[in-house]
Amino acid sequence: MGAGRVEPHGAHLVGSVALASPPVLFRTAGELLGARLKRIPDGEPGGRNLWISWQYPLLRASPYLQVDENEPANASTGFRRLALAPGVAAADVRFGELGYAREARASYVDFLRARQAGKLPADCRFQVCLPTPFACVFPFVSAGAFAAVEPAYEAAMMAELQSLFAEIPHADLALQWDVCIEMVLWDGGSQFIKSPWGERTREEVLARMTRICAGVPAAVELGVHLCYGDWEARHFVEPRDMGHMVDLASALRHAIAHKLAWIHMPVPVGRDDDGFFKPLSGLSADPATEIYLGLLHLADGVDGARRRIEAAGRYLGSFGVATECGLGRCKTPEMVSDILRLHAQTAAPHGR
């Protein structure tokens, strides 16, 4: 990188990666990114590749829920919202294992093998990416059942966390909350995701984030992925600039007792202008919090990334690189490798 240029340090993998298995991801990312990685997810293979979609069958199988015959199927997903089954009261609803901890425990074994074999940095952590409980309930449950289902599902997700904390050493674990639907609601720009809380939307978002972060042990790293959606490779709504992301990130710093180890923010491919990045100058983040900007796009490669890096560098002193969202939609392993190389071409290793 030339003299005087902004030089990002470190790379962040947001979550899903379209490779065959966790061992393949650990080997491939380790080879291409090396010391740029402080933490690595398992790539969310199988049903998790489509983020929350794999939770719909779990909800649909619940004896407390049934298809809401008064609502049509979602035109994009084909899912039909669920309502309470006849005779079910709010206090009846409960869920057992959601599957996230079970998947993480299996992948952690692969992670340990890869790290012990030197395929990953010795200090790399195992990153578990989880959707917020709200995000899993809100799209799949009718408005009339939401108040009954959300607390029960949130309790089940907290049980998943306790399983993770009990079985994965805290010094090896990094937990990322995928804050997607809440980010869109916080932004207020979407016409097809309507807030259930009206004027209290921001208050309710922060209350939920405070709850789900409260029990994370101090030694477990905690981060957030602020997301505007990736359905069919498009955002639910395009951010006008980074202002709302900066507002939410700053608010989370003060609302959550656990310090955030990292924050990820997406950057659309067409935005390399000062107007988009200027709000970063107002970011109120802990100095120890790593900021990763999702400004890497295969569509314009290194040149486009460099333009966005230079624009961001005028308002943010230190940051790493990432893609806008996960890499689960990549059609070939070669495409994944190309994107991982783009991380390596645009960021220096941590500590350099």
Image: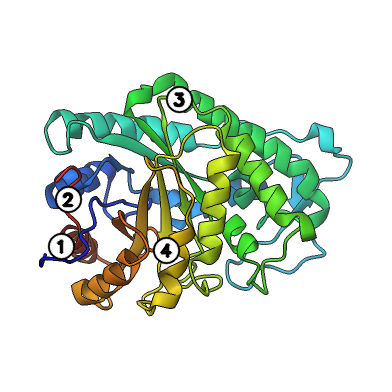
Question: Which callout, 3 or 2, points to the residue nearer the camera?
Answer: 3
Going from N to C along the chain, the mark reached first, 4 or 1, is 4
Kindly check if marks 2 and 1 are in contact, taking CB atoms under 8 A apart as contact: no
Q: Is residue 55 left or right of residue 316?
A: right
| Amino acid of disc 3 | Ala
**Residue 46 in view:** yes
Coordinates of residue 203 in the picture (x, y in percent):
71, 49
Give the total of numbered labels.
4
Mark 4 closeness class: few <14, some 14–19, many ≥20 residues within 10 Å: many
Identify the residue position indicated by label 2 in the image. 33
Question: Which callout, 2 or 1, points to the residue nearer the camera?
Answer: 1
CA distance for labels 2 and 1:
9 Å
Coordinates of residue 112 in the picture (x, y in percent):
24, 29
Coordinates of residue 74 in the picture (x, y in percent):
65, 68
| Amino acid of disc 1 | Gln
Mark 3 closeness class: few <14, some 14–19, many ≥20 residues within 10 Å: few
Q: Residue at x 61, y 65 (%)?
A: 187
Kindly check if marks 3 and 2 are in contact, taking CB atoms under 8 A apart as contact: no
CA distance for labels 4 and 1:
19 Å
Above or below 68: residue 260: above
Q: Quadrant of the N terminus?
A: bottom left
* Residue 345 badge: 1
Secondary structure of the residue carrying tag 2 is helix
Going from N to C along the chain, the mark reached first, 2 or 1, is 2
CA distance for labels 2 and 4:
20 Å
Kindly check if marks 4 and 1 are in contact, taking CB atoms under 8 A apart as contact: no
Identify the residue position indicated by label 3 in the image. 218
Going from N to C along the chain, the mark reached first, 3 or 1, is 3
Mark 2 closeness class: few <14, some 14–19, many ≥20 residues within 10 Å: many
